Amino acid sequence: AAPAAEGPQPTPHTQKAYDPIDSDFHGRWTRADARQIMRTQNDTSVERGENSMPESITMPEIPKDFPIMTDEVWVWDTWSLTDEHSNQMSYKGWDVIFSLVAPRDIPFDERHWSARIGYFTRPSSADPDEAWTYGGYLFEDETSLSNTEWSGSARLLQGNKIRVFYTATTFGEKRPGTDGKPAVLATVLGKIKATKKGVSFSGFGEHVEIAEPDGTWYQTQEQNQYFSFRDPFTFEDPATPGITFMLFEGCGAGVPGTEETNATAEDLGYVDGDPFAETVDEVNAKGVQYQRGNIGLAWADSSDLTSWTMLPPILTAYGVNDQTERPQMIIEDGKYFLFTISHQFTYAAGLRGPDGVYGFVGDGIRSDFQPLNSSGVVLGSPVDLNLPADAPESPTAGQNPRQFQAYSHYIQPGGLVQSFIDNVDGRRGGTLSPTVKVDVDGATATSAVDYSFGDNGLGPYAYIPTNKRKGGVGHY
Ligand code: FRU
């Protein structure tokens, strides 16, 4: 384990729940929390470029000779067909996953601007190592709400109906016939069909915009060109059956540089008298007004999930980190686990952490969330945190060659975590990683990578098993 360095105490968090709809309380991932990474999860004595984090939060190394799923498309953000409780649903004997894809002949780092939602299938009975079959784009060309389709989620509803939620982003010229809004959340209803031979999708109806940033809770592009607004994830809470909620990635509203975007004492979160505390003025002088990630909430006010009421965010990372992406809520035994992914290069000045999964636990959807492992880090790509933060295109010489090995992790039932391979020692991935398993303990608000899973912690590539079925046969 890393020898504890000197540093501040974490912010005390009660985990107390507030009404998700009527309260405007939000949890805070504070600077004091994020500084626990360097205080308790970084070994200052490692050789340059070794992994400096404890094994319990490090994703095992992906071998450089990893296989790719298809020659046709780059594959990144991926999600399963689920029910309202994040169960992974098989349909008539088939497993289905959805991924952002782009033609493999465009440069990997330019994929975002050509992103479409694609899908893969395989028989539910398949061996975990059996390949997924690429099925092509989910939507017909020029039918979605914008020129690119970014991440979302997909719900299996009654019968053969599926409802897809996604982000419609516009880059460059807007597609004729679309509004050309920079980023909106969208939904569409369609049908899944399964035969002995395979799975297809059809009958997609009208794509509907369901949310856009309001400029009050959620930053607009006019307020900051580096705003984020994306990645809808829907779920029901067994405590309030019949209400569907949606999480999404946002940024706190306001124009950077104005008073409204300054970090506050609560965002810093130091306990009184902490000798390692920073002052609000000192922090704001570093320009942290640009790092205002939050996790947004909305609830469906129509039973067909096409009309939504926006609510204040449930978690903020103001003055801490600019991106809290692909949020997911996993509810287990009365505890609410909020997971999100983030990058090293989106941290605010004075903070350092890995690319990977961050997690929080509370007593309800809207809680005084406590970061798992004190800092929030649950699973990071191997990295030497003693070296400065890097962007993928310009790594520090001698840094760990796997610091960007995987991203866009998605938490599955049973603590299985899938992600996509980005860069393993210079080899770009664009394909799904080996699945890993993380054991989370709500009682102690801690987690640890399970090294007894798979091959010393690395499970099969793209291991995304279903745990519930509609139709078909099988043991679950
Ligand atoms: C995470 C992410 C998502 C977004 C997608 C775009 O990997 O940034 O937030 O939907 O990538 O490629």
Image (cartoon, rainbow, N blue to C red):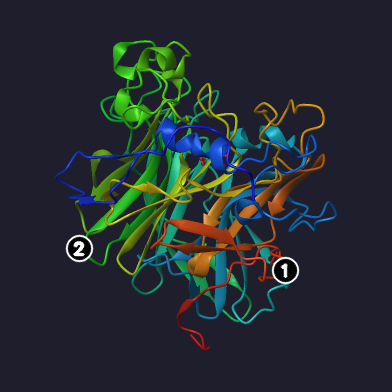
- Considering the numbered disc 2 on the image, is that residue within a helix, a strand or a loop? loop
316 above or below 161? Answer: above
The correct choice, above or below, for 243 with respect to 64 in the image is below
Which residue occupies the foreground of this view, 121 or 317? 317
- For the residue pair 297 and 58, the one nearer the viewer reads as 58
Marks counted in the figure total 2
Query: Which picture quadrant has residue 396?
Result: top right
| Quadrant in which residue 452 is drawn | bottom right
| Residue labelled with disc 2 | 240
Q: Are marks 1 and 2 in contact (CB under 8 Å)?
A: no
Which labelled disc corresponds to residue 295? Answer: none
Residue 306 appearing in the image: no
Q: What type is the residue that disc 1 sits on?
A: Ala
Residue in view at x 71 percent, y 37 percent: 384
Q: Position of residue 267 (x, y in %)?
A: 35, 29
Q: Which sits earlier in the primary sequence, circle 1 or circle 2?
A: 1
Residue labelled with disc 1: 131
Looking at the image, residue 231 sits to the left or right of residue 356; the answer is left
Q: Is residue 6 left or right of residue 425?
A: left
193 displayed left or right of 64: left
Q: Is residue 140 visible?
A: yes
Label 2 beta carbon less than 8 Å to ligand 1:
no
Q: Quadrant of ligand 1?
A: top right
Between 318 and 130, the one lying in front of the other is 318
Residue at (48, 68) in percent of width and height? 413
Can you give x and y, in whole percent of width and height, for residue 151 in the image?
Answer: 50, 46
Q: Position of residue 275 (x, y in %)?
A: 42, 25
SS of the residue under disc 1: loop
Seen in the picture, residue 215 relative to 140 is either above or below; the reply is above
Q: Quick one: which residue is furthest to the right in this view?
A: 65
